[in-house]
Amino acid sequence: MSEMELTKENIVKQLRRLCAHCSSGQAVVHRCAVKELALRVQSIRGVPLIVNDEFRGILSPTYR
């Protein structure tokens, strides 16, 4: 697993702890804004752009 995938997985785990329903593990039906954010983080694809040891964004692959 790449470093970016590990970082995304860590972010998703931290996000899920923010919702009481998700972190408790109970099957409670609810509209979870945290889950929506986690799905967006998981969907990030591309190569991280790092300049002078700072994250500057993601370079998305283009398919032609």
Image (spheres, rainbow, N blue to C red):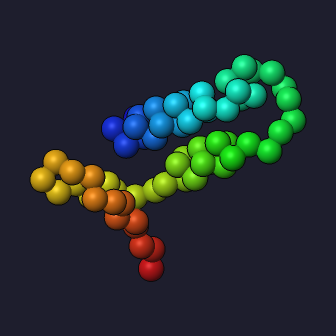
Q: Looking at this view, name the residue that lies furthest to the bottom.
A: 64
Q: Quadrant of residue 18?
A: top right
| Quarter of the figure with the C terminus | bottom left
- The residue closer to the viewer here, 40 or 45, is 40
- The residue closer to the viewer here, 32 or 3, is 32
Can you see residue 40? Answer: yes
Query: Percent x, y for residue 63?
Result: 45, 74
Q: Looking at this view, name the residue that lies furthest to the right.
A: 29
Query: Percent x, y for residue 56?
Result: 28, 59
Q: Quadrant of residue 7?
A: top left
- Looking at the image, residue 58 lies above or below residue 20: below
Query: Percent x, y for residue 11?
Result: 48, 37
Can you see residue 9? Answer: no
Q: Residue at x 17, y 57 (%)?
A: 51
Asked if residue 34 lies left or right of residue 56, the reply is: right
| Quarter of the figure with the N terminus | top left
Query: Percent x, y for residue 57?
Result: 33, 60
- Looking at the image, residue 61 lies above or below residue 12: below
- Looking at the image, residue 2 lies above or below residue 20: below
Q: Residue at x 40, y 58 (%)?
A: 46
